[in-house]
């Protein structure tokens, strides 16, 4: 007879209890390690967003890198595979 593992029942015997843990339990301290930051009446400052020039520059860099990757792929990876009759 096969023991039924999925349902948690076996042939009537129970598994031995796990050995006691050797790691001592953490004792909660009276004060938290890092106090929460004080809430200001004004609120938290928003991070500064890039301006129009910064956005244009990052877009240009992305386009340049993408173009270089595509050119390298077409020239060095795919061109040996293409045969022209």
Image (cartoon, grey):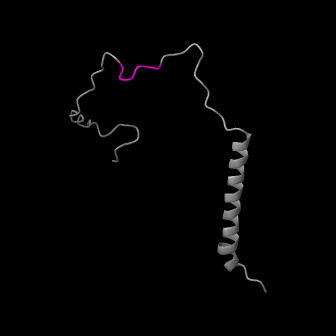
**Residue occupying the point 67% across, 58% down:** 65
Question: Compared with residue 42, is residue 22 higher up or lower down, i.e. above or below?
Answer: below
Out of 45 and 30, give the one closest to the viewer.
Answer: 45
Question: Compared with residue 73, is residue 47 higher up or lower down, i.e. above or below?
Answer: above
Quarter of image, res 27? top left
Quarter of image, res 23? top left
Q: Which residues are magenta?
A: 32-37
Question: Compared with residue 49, is residue 30 higher up or lower down, i.e. above or below?
Answer: above
**Residue occupying the point 28% across, 36% down:** 12
Image coordinates for residue 34, horizontal then vertical, percent: 39, 23
- Toward the bottom, the furthest residue is 85
- Residue 7 lies in the magenta stretch: no
Image coordinates for residue 2, horizontal then vertical, percent: 35, 47
**Residue occupying the point 23% across, 36% down:** 16
- Toward the top, the furthest residue is 41
Out of 22 and 66, give the one closest to the viewer.
Answer: 66
Image coordinates for residue 71, horizontal then vertical, percent: 70, 67
- Toward the right, the furthest residue is 85
């Amino acid at each position: 007879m096969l023991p039924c593992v999925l349902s948690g029942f076996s042939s009537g015997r129970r598994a031995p209890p796990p050995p006691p843990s050797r790691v001592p339990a953490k004792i909660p301290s009276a004060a938290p390690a890092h106090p929460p930051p004080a809430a200001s009446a004004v609120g938290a400052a928003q991070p500064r967003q890039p301006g129009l020039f910064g956005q244009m520059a990052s877009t240009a860099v992305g386009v340049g890198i993408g173009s270089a990757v595509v050119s390298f792929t077409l020239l060095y990876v795919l061109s040996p595979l293409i045969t022209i009759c």
